[in-house]
Image (cartoon, coloured by chain):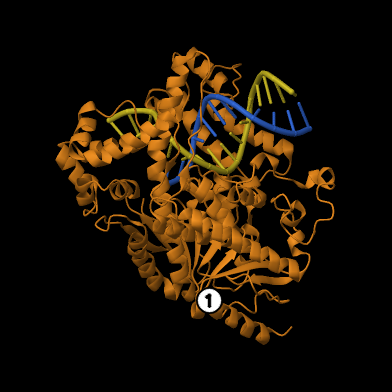
Chain colours: A orange, B blue, C yellow
Amino acid sequence: MGTPVVIEELANLGMEARGLLAVALHPDRGIGLATVAGSRSVATDDPFAVIGPIEEALAPRWVWWGRSTAEVLAGGPVPIARCWDVVAVDRLLVGGSRVTIGQVWAHLNDLDPSSIPSMGQLDLLSSADEGADKDDPVRPDGYLRPEWVDGGWRDSTARLARWAELALRAATIQHALLDQRPDPERARSTAHCESVAELLCAELAHHGLPVDEDEAASIIAGVAGPRPTDRADEEREQRRRDGDVLRHLGPGHHVNLRNPEEVKSMLRRNGLDLPDTRAWRLEKLRDTSPLIDALLTWRKAERIATTYGYGWLDEHVSGGRLRGEWSSSDGAAGRMTASAGLHNLPAPMRSAVAAEPGHRFVRADLGQIEPRVLAAVSGDPALIAATAEDDLYQPVAERLGVDRDVAKVAVLGAMYGATTGVSAGALRGLQRNYPVAMAFLEEAARQGQLGHDLFTIGGRRIRIGGGSAPDGDIDRALAAAASRGRYARNALIQGAAAEFFKAWAVIVRRRVSPHRAQVVLCLHDELLVHTPVEQAATVADLVADAVAEAAFYWSPEPAVRFLAETSIIARWSEAKD
DNA sequence: ATCGTAGGCGCC
DNA sequence: AAAGGGCGCCTACGAT
C-alpha cells in the first residue's frame, strides 16, 4: 500500500468526519482508523508517513485509548495538536488514577467493576463465551475481551480498525457524561487539555531532560566522594561521612544516623528532648550545637549520596538525558507526577541540568498561581482586584493592616487548612475582607469533613476517602474528618492550579514546536523549554503569551490576572530564585 | 525473601 | 511566620 494513496484516503476521511477521528497505532502493523460515523476504516503499513500533513489542514481530533498510542506518536515526527485520550478523560470523570482500559470500559457502560475479566480467568469463562465471535472486542456480557486489551487488538489490521472504532464509542460516551457537568463547556475543554497533557507526558518521557553528565558526576563526587570501586569502598566512604557527625559524640557511642529513633535518643542524651528530629525543628537549634549542625549537614549530603548519587546517574541518565516516567494526573487533585527525581532534584544539583550546544532553556514559572486561582474559582471581587498587582500579597497586606509576609502566610494557610499559627487577627481579617474566597474554602472543607466528593472548576472529580470510623474512637474520627477537610480545601485549589498549568503547558507545546523547541520539564508551576539559541527570544515571547491564552480558555473570571516570569538560560541553576 | 508502614527529606 | 496540602524516594523495621 503506497503512502500517497493513504494520504488521499485520510484526507477524504477527515473531510467527512469534520471532527473525531479515532486511531490505533502499531509500529509494525500500521494504523487502524474509524470515522465519526464508525463506517469506514483504512490501514497502512507505515504509521508515520501518513499523518503529518493533515493536522493543521483538517484539524480533526485524534482519539485513542491511552498511553500506548501516545508513546508511538511521541517518538515520531507527527505534529498532533488535538487529541482525546480515553483513559485520561476517565481519570477526569471518576477521579483517582491508574485505571486499565477494561475498567474504563466498565465505568462507561455501567458494568460491575468487581466482575471485570482478566487474562487469568480465560479458562473459567470459556464456557460462557463459547461460540462467541473472538474477533469482537466486546463479549456478550458487555465487558471487553481481556485478550484484546492485553494486546490482541494489534493482531491484524482489521482488529486495529475495530479497536479504534471502539475508542471512538468510548469517547462519545465520555462526551455525553461531561455534558452533565455543571459547566460542560469547561469540562470538555479540560478533557482536551488533559488528553494533550498525556501526549506531552509521553514526549517528556521519550525526550528526557538535558543533563550535563560530567557536571552531575562532579557534584556527586563533592558530596559522596569519588565513584566507589567496590562494595567495601562504598562502605568506607559511608563511614567517613558518618564520622563527621559521630566524632561530636563521645568515643564508643555508636548511633545509626539512618534510624530516627536512635537519633532521637542520642539527642535526648545530649539534653534535647524533641518529639521528632525533623529538619525545621533542628534548624532552630543549629547554632546552639556543633552536633546538630553536623547532623543537618550530614542529612543534606546523605540525600544526594543516596537518592541522587552514582546509582541514580547510572539508572536514569544516559546519552545526556535524564528520563523518568511521567503521569499527567497521578496526583489526587490532578497534578502531574514524575519519577527519577525529575520533580525533586535538590537545588545544588540543578547546575547539571544544561541546554545542549547551540541551545538554551526558556524557563518560566507562574507567579503566585494558587491565590490567583483562588480568586478565579471563588469569584471574590476584592481578591480579583488584588490580582492586578504583580505582587498580590501587597494589596492584601494593606487591607489587613499587616506585614506583607504575614499576609502571605495567612493566605497560604487558609488554602492549606492551617490550624495553628496564623494569628487569629490575620485570619479574621481575611474573612472580613475576602468573605467570598474564605467561604469557598470553608465550604470545600465542610464537604470534605462530611466525606463528600468534590469537583474542581475544570470538572475533575476529587475523591474524598470514606473514612468511616466504626466503634468508638471519637478523637480519631474527628482527626480524620479534619484531615479530609484540609485535603478537600487544598485539593480544589491545587487541582484547579494543575488544570491551569496543563492548559498553559499544552499551548506552549503547540506554539513552540514550529521553532524546533521542546517542552522538557513540567514542574507544577514551572516550565523548561529546550530551544535552538537563535529561536530563544521568540520562544520566550510565545511562552509568556501562552499564559494569557491559557487564562482565556480556563479562567471563569476574565478579570483575574495571571503572570509568568520567563528567562533564557543555559543552566537551570541560573534561574532566579 | 517480600510486602507495607513510618519517619524523614527533596521539590512544588 | 509556621510547620498545613501534594508528590517520589530513601532507610529501617515489623509482619507475612
The kind of residue on which mark 1 rests is Glu
Kindly identify the residue that appears in the image at 36 percent across and 50 percent down. Answer: A577
Is A274 located above or below residue A486 in the figure?
above
Quadrant in the picture for the N terminus of chain A:
bottom right
Q: Nearer the viewer, residue A359 or A565?
A: A565
Mark 1 residue element: helix
Q: From the viewer's perspective, is A479 left or right of A95?
A: left
Which residue is painted at 80% across and 56% down in the image? A132
Answer yes or no: is residue A411 visible: no
Q: Is residue A263 left or right of residue A41?
A: left
Expressed as whole percent of the image width and height from the top left, the position of residue A510 reads: 46, 69
Residue at 58% of width from left, 48% of height from top? Answer: A339
**Which of the two residues, A365 or A43, is positioned nearer the viewer here?**
A43
Q: Which residue is mark 1?
A: A55
Place of residue A261 in the rendered image (x, y in percent of width and height, measured from the top left): 56, 19
Vertical placement of residue A58 versus A402, above or below? below
Q: Position of residue A297 (x, y in %)?
A: 48, 34
Is residue A335 visible in this depiction of the protein?
Answer: yes
A40 or A316: which is nearer to us?
Answer: A40
Residue A338 lies left or right of residue A50; in this view the side is: left
